[in-house]
Amino acid sequence: MRIVQVFKNIDRRVIFLFIALSVIVPLIFNITFTEKASPIVKNIFDKIESLPEGSRVLVSLDYGPSTFPEIQPMTNALIRHLNERKMKIYYMCLWATGQNLTTYTIDSVQVREFPDRRYGIDYVNLGYKAGNEGLINVLLTDMKKMYSTDVHGTYTDDIVMMRALRNLTGFDLIISLGGGSPGIKEWVLFAGDPGNIPVAGGSTAVQAPLLYPYWPNQLVGLMGGIKGAAEYESELKKHYPVYENRSQPGIKMMGPQAIAHIVIMLFIIIGNITFFVERSLAKRGQAHG
Amino acid sequence: MKRQLPVLITGIVGAVLVVSVFIPHAPFGRLGEDFSVFFDIIAVFAFILGGGNLLRVHGDKIYRRAKGWQFSIVTVLGFIITLIAGAFKIGNVNGIRGDVTAPGSLFTNIYDFIFTPLQATMFSILAFFVASASYRAFRAKNKEATILLITAFIVLLGRTPIGNYATAWLPSWLSFFHVPNLANWIMAIPNLAGQRAIMIGISLGVVSMSLRVILGIERGYIGSEGGKG
């Protein structure tokens, strides 16, 4: 059986080529699918909808460029939603690599799309501080002990939205968008649980299964990978028609992901057929000889 | 004394931190808070230690012309240039007092145009290797492997809109078998049970290890003395 040998010894570069095509083609032809938010994602949306205008929301961007393509779409969707709901947004990060991404998010979404919202009154960038969970531990008792200034060097006592804020218990919601540790888990363990503060998260698809044990009691909701971002974007489009015709990167990236998953599954099926045919041929060979 | 003092400090700090969780009142609450601040301050010095270690290891490699020493030159140069660009805020419109991530600064340009594409590329390459590895390793060789294979298929399908279309025709009383619902069930029930079991196991291990460290039984973290444990 020559064909079995061909599939058995398939060059990995052939697989690479198929994966590359499965990603490139849907991007070129803009193949998209309709998304429906699953309960774990919808819970975050509903939680933000339920908060009154002017509620304090801490957004911690705990990721770096490696997971930027996967996490940034959900960050953008969340920031849009928080601004539409007129929340007070406090940006910070537990990852050193997150500070540039915070600046990027503020420049590309916060300032560009919501120019009427004012720095220090509607949003503030606290930036990065070292310490991981140790930092969260201190923030839980005293924010200003660690953040005496914002990212621009302005004293937090001089920032209007920081004045009345003593510690993390002053927040109505903490959202951690992260690709590893420290991230969502640390926010749950060191802030959410001891401070009784609702925590929501967005993580890479690889990390999402590890965070399921915290849902729904310790985590309000969780967005896992591009799928989570696309679901959140679809919910945003449904409730805020202004986003109906705007490009949604999560939904756009679901096309390549769906096709790539199908290609991987086809390869697994081919691999298994080859395996069973080869095994039956070997058994037949043994029986005959 | 060199070994006894760190053990004593660790024991006191560990015990106070444990007590401060259960008795968050004076003096333990305050002490627990102060120790967390000390930790955050010490964490900053870890960067200096890490940077120094990086220079030592790669400097030694370059000096000895060890295998791949040319890559070490790139590492050392990359480290020094980025450090200088960030520390002195070169090209920052607001000068030394400005935000280190201000657009247009050398540090931001290094981050945006070198660091970001490099990291994104490294992570993206994983998709190709995952596909190749799945093709070669995912075989229904036995009962356990078959269960794993079927589970992986359902979750893979459930994470795409195609899974939604494939079983959308199912009547409502069979909605449990709708692929996205099945995928959600796998994630929320069997996966959750497994993850919780692992987490509880790890936590018990952490508790026993922490007790050993606090009581001074486990001293491996101090390192060896003169090559002896």
Image: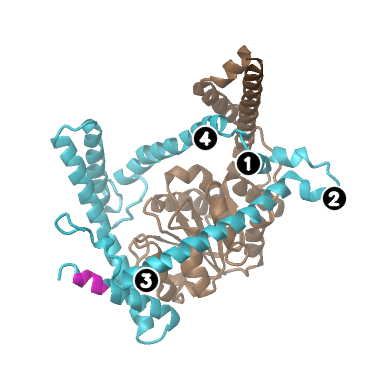
Secondary structure under badge 4?
helix
- Tell me if B205 is positioned left or right of A149 in this view: right
Secondary structure under badge 1?
helix
Residue bearing mark 2: B172
Q: Is residue A276 above or below residue B63?
A: above
Looking at the image, do the residues carrying marks 3 and 1 touch, with CB atoms under 8 Å apart?
no
* Circle 3 or circle 4, nearest the eye: 3
Residue bearing mark 1: B152
Q: Amino acid at mark 4?
A: Val
Visible residue check, residue A122: no
Q: Nearer the N terminus, badge 3 or badge 4?
A: 4
**Distance between the alpha carbons at the discs numbered 2 and 1:** 24 Å
Q: Nearer the N terminus, badge 3 or badge 1?
A: 1
Residue bearing mark 3: B211
Q: Amino acid at mark 2?
A: Ser
Q: Amino acid at mark 1?
A: Ala
**Distance between the alpha carbons at the discs numbered 4 and 1:** 13 Å
Q: Which residues are magenta?
A: B4-9
**Distance between the alpha carbons at the discs numbered 3 and 4:** 40 Å
Residue situated furthest bottom in the rendering? B26
Q: Callout 4: residue from which chain?
A: B
